[in-house]
Amino acid sequence: MALPDPQRRYPVTLPDGTEHAGTVFLSQAIDHPAFEVGDYTYASDFDPPEDWANRLAPYLFPASAEKLRIGRFCQIAHGVRFITSSANHAMDGLTTYPFPIFQPDQMDGYQPDKRDTIIGHDVWLGYGAMVMPGANIGNGVIIGAGSVVRGTIPDYAIVTGNPGTVLRYRFSAQDIERLQHLRWWDWPTTHIVRAEKSLLSGDLSALATLRP
């Protein structure tokens, strides 16, 4: 086993030798000042866009005050959207109508919500999931298809529904603590390659013996 080259835009090679354009490593497909993404994180789409940043986070603008940060080894299915803080309207007045955006002298710097959206490492976001402004999703989380996620999601939780709620945890509290301590996604690639069997089989004890 060998990890794919993280510098490849299209990491999936089909049996006929062609590159699968519907799956991209986002670090190679996105050049956006407010969109940060770690190595090996991929997104898939049945209608691959030219502009992946705009497809995934349509309200994240170059001048946005917030950041969208996604960790390493995440998996993002077709239809996932990140609704970032630039989409929010002010809600502390008598109206939510954004008058300043229509006035050039007031538009610059006007953004009522500036919270970052944070996605941890090894997160799987299922088909059509929607991540709302300011969400903070922990490591190892699974977001079910069609879920609408807001707030803080604990590490290794499985989230479903609208509003997204924790259905259960993937592992025991003790094992989650061990995984957080091991942080395999930060290991050198040679160690991750050696750990493939342990990672896929769920053998946490074996994984611990391979820690660099």
Image (cartoon, grey):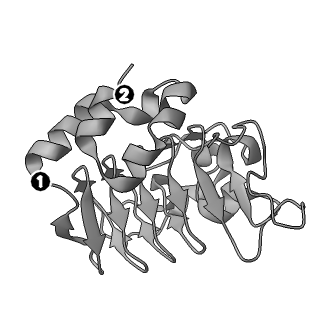
Name the image quarter holding the C terminus: top left
From what the image shows, is residue 107 above or below residue 150?
above
Residue placed most toward the observer, 194 or 11: 194
Q: CA distance from mark 2 to mark 1?
A: 21 Å
Q: Quick check: 140 left or right of 89?
A: left
Q: Residue at x 59, y 57 (%)?
A: 101
Secondary structure beneath dot 1 equals loop
Task: Name the front one of labels 2 and 1.
Answer: 2
Query: Which residue, as the protein is rendered here, is positioned at the far top?
Result: 212
Which mark, by number, is residue 210?
2
Q: Residue at x 57, y 46 (%)?
A: 106
How many marks can you see? 2
Q: Residue at x 30, y 80 (%)?
A: 162
Q: Residue at x 9, y 43 (%)?
A: 174
Judge whether residue 58 can be spotted in this image.
no
Residue 160 place in picture, x, y as percent:
29, 76
Packing grade of label 1 (10 A; few <14, some 14-19, many >=20) is few
Which mark, by number, is residue 172?
1
Name the image quarter holding the N terminus: top right
The answer to which quarter of the image holds residue 180 is top left
Secondary structure beneath dot 2 equals loop
Residue 185 place in picture, x, y as percent:
44, 35
Q: Quick check: 93 left or right of 5?
A: left
If you read the primary sequence from the N terminus, does the residue marked by circle 2 or circle 1 appear first? Answer: 1
Judge whether residue 196 can be spotted in this image.
yes
From what the image shows, is residue 73 above or below residue 49?
above
Residue 200 place in picture, x, y as percent:
41, 53
The answer to which quarter of the image holds residue 24 is bottom right
Task: Give the residue type at disc 2.
Answer: Leu
